[in-house]
């Protein structure tokens, strides 16, 4: 199973949407002094109208992003990723950067509206940078995959009756051959590791055309002529996908023979610029890297103390190793034997969700919404290969949508690999994983985000805030006593939670080291296995993930540390008036905005 440190939120938006939100660059200001204030009601109305105009234009340009937001009718459109489309997208970014800049000149905006404007400005600048400098469309073959909107349409009975959804599917099917033809033409010296993942993911998508769409056609009760037409278009789409996979395999064969292909490493300039746009932290990438190194040492000291406490009960009078890392590793290895049976893995995850929900309510940490259940499922095959567990949440425009907790099945592993994996996700760590992915982590945060009064902050979410909240949720639960035994803190849970936190920190170290410092596979495996105590299966998959992604692994440590710092700032300001639940709910009310933006809004409110 492809596992992540704190398992990654799998994005379902188009890749360009995933780049969203960079460092806050100032929106253009009027040069002739402050503009006259517009009455707040009129300003709000004008601002909202312009945001709606932008979103309509954005979804027309990026229909897959519209689907991710819950506008499923847009799934009928599948623009071919041609050079002409790239130029249209670039012109779109330039046009709206100028148009939105005018709002700050002519309207007296609230702090929340100013934040929205900054987010849109940053998103458009990130889009422009991606189209002109990063140019991953030339080397990252994983960007080309048509599967998700088809799957969304097949699984949304509340959106429209099946015959109507098949009508949209039929329109999309007709565009698949042109899409893959343009995708193949775009790829110049693709990265071999991305190429291999693209082959695997697109091969996984074949089941949609081979099984799922034909099954839906049979179930829909269509007229014979309609069913025959969709069947014919589906056959052509499947053939186009198969031809694309074959073409990628041919490129891969050539690369294996001659060693060609672009390096998966971004390099210093691209990585640090991407970090600024995607992570939007209060520090730059090199500073975060140094902070992660320092935090790693702090965690090792804590883990050493837990190991000393646990050693006598686990090993009796056996001498404690002089080497700190060896000592910690022995204790972790002994404890890790306690894990769920392979056949019970998914069921154990399902069973734990109600207990987490009950704990959150009883400890008054957050208000939950029982009307929006979480469904645990096997990860769809076209989504596998990056994150072993993830959340697929409905978009803002899909208020009744189901949230899925995706878990990769263990059937790809040998018995030895499955045992390695289950030792990594042992009795204690699996609990932390479920907190992170489900309650009160990603699942809860994304439900709150969709209820935010700001469409922009909900739609253009910052990954560091999203992942940071999930890591903070783990800390919040541990501070509240989760995992205690007979009311006392558990040294076993303390050690395993520290190990999990070490993964968060190691993610950031690995991310920067791989893409900027040129870390080798052997060096990465040493960091992950010896210094972070990860199993071989986990470490091997993390090395793969570091190659096929960039900057995302830095999001966990960044967001978590900034949320925790904000909480402590507010505690100091409010003293005895500070309420943990109120902090959580106010923080989450700002959608998925970058932590430093939420920090400014909350600290300003606390000062007034």
Image (tube, rainbow, N blue to C red):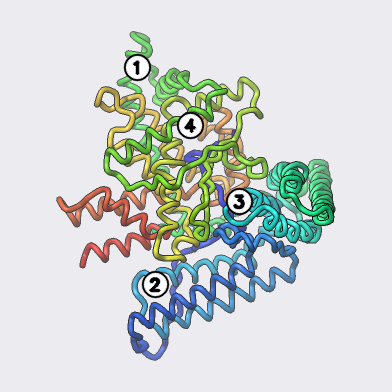
User: Quick check: 86 left or right of 497?
Assistant: right
Write down the residue under mark 2: 113
Q: Tell us which disc is closer to us: 3 or 1.
A: 3
SS category of the residue bearing label 2: helix
SS category of the residue bearing label 4: helix
Do callouts 2 and 1 mark residues in contact (Cβ within 8 Å)? Answer: no
Identify the mark at residue 311; answer none if there is no mark. Answer: 1
Write down the residue under mark 4: 349
User: Quick check: 524 left or right of 284?
Assistant: right
Specify few, some or many for label 1: CA neighbours under 10 Å numbering under 14, 14-19, or 20 or more. some
First in sequence, mark 2 or 3: give its number: 2
Is residue 269 at least partly visible in the picture? no
SS category of the residue bearing label 3: loop
Identify the mark at residue 224; answer none if there is no mark. Answer: none
Classify 509 as above or below 135.
Answer: above
Quarter containing the C terminus: bottom left
């Amino acid at each position: 199973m492809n596992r992540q440190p704190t398992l990654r939120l799998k994005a379902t938006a188009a890749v360009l949407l995933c780049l969203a939100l960079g460092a806050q660059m100032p929106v253009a200001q009027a040069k002739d002094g402050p503009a006259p204030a517009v009455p707040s009601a009129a300003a709000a109305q004008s601002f909202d109208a312009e945001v709606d105009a932008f979103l309509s234009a954005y979804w027309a340009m990026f229909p897959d992003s519209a689907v991710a937001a819950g506008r499923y009718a847009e799934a009928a459109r599948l623009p071919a990723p041609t050079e002409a489309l790239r130029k249209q997208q670039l012109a779109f970014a330039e046009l709206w950067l100028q148009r939105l800049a005018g709002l700050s000149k002519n309207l007296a905006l609230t702090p929340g509206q100013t934040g929205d404007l900054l987010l849109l400005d940053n998103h458009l600048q990130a889009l422009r940078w991606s189209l002109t400098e990063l140019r991953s469309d030339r080397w990252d073959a994983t960007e080309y995959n048509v599967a998700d909107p088809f799957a969304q349409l097949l699984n949304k009975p509340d959106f429209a009756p099946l015959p109507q959804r098949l009508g949209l599917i039929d329109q999309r099917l007709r565009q698949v051959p042109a899409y893959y033809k343009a995708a193949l033409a775009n790829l110049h010296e693709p990265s071999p590791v991305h190429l291999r993942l693209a082959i695997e993911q697109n091969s996984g998508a074949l089941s949609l055309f081979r099984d799922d769409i034909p099954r839906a056609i049979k179930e829909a009760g269509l007229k014979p002529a309609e069913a025959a037409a969709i069947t014919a278009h589906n056959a052509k789409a499947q053939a186009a996908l198969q031809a694309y996979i074959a073409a990628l395999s041919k490129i891969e064969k050539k690369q294996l023979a001659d060693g060609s292909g672009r390096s998966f490493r971004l390099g210093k300039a691209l990585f640090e610029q991407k970090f600024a746009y995607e992570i939007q932290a209060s520090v730059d990438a090199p500073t975060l890297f140094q902070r992660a190194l320092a935090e790693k040492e702090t965690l090792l000291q804590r883990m050493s103390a837990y190991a000393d406490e646990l050693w006598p009960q686990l090993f009796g009078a056996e001498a404690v190793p002089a080497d700190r890392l060896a000592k910690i590793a022995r204790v972790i290895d002994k404890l890790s034997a306690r894990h769920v049976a392979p056949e019970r893995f998914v069921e154990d995850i399902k069973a734990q969700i109600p207990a987490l929900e009950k704990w959150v309510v009883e400890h008054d940490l957050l208000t939950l919404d029982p009307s929006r259940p979480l469904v645990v499922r096997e990860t769809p095959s076209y989504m596998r290969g990056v994150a072993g567990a993830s959340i697929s949440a409905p978009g803002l425009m899909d208020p009744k949508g189901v949230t899925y907790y995706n878990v990769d099945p263990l059937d790809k592993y040998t018995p030895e690999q499955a045992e390695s994996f289950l030792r990594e996700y042992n009795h204690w760590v699996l609990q932390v994983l479920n907190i992170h992915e489900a309650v009160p982590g990603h699942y809860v945060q994304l439900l709150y985000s969709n209820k935010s009064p700001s469409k922009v902050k909900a739609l253009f979410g910052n990954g560091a805030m999203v992942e940071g909240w999930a890591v903070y949720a783990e800390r919040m639960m541990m501070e509240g006593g989760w995992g205690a035994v007979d009311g006392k803190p558990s040294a076993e849970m303390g050690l395993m939670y520290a190990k999990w936190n070490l993964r968060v920190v190691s993610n950031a170290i690995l991310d920067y080291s791989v893409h900027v410092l040129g870390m080798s596979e052997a060096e990465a495996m040493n960091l992950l296995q010896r210094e972070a105590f990860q199993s071989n299966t986990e470490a091997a998959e993390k090395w793969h993930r570091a190659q096929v992604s960039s900057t995302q692994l830095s999001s966990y440590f960044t967001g978590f540390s900034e949320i925790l710092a904000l909480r402590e700032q507010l505690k100091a300001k409010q003293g005895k008036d500070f309420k943990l639940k109120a902090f959580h709910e106010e923080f989450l009310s700002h959608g998925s905005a970058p932590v430093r933006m939420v920090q400014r809004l909350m600290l300003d409110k606390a000062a007034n």
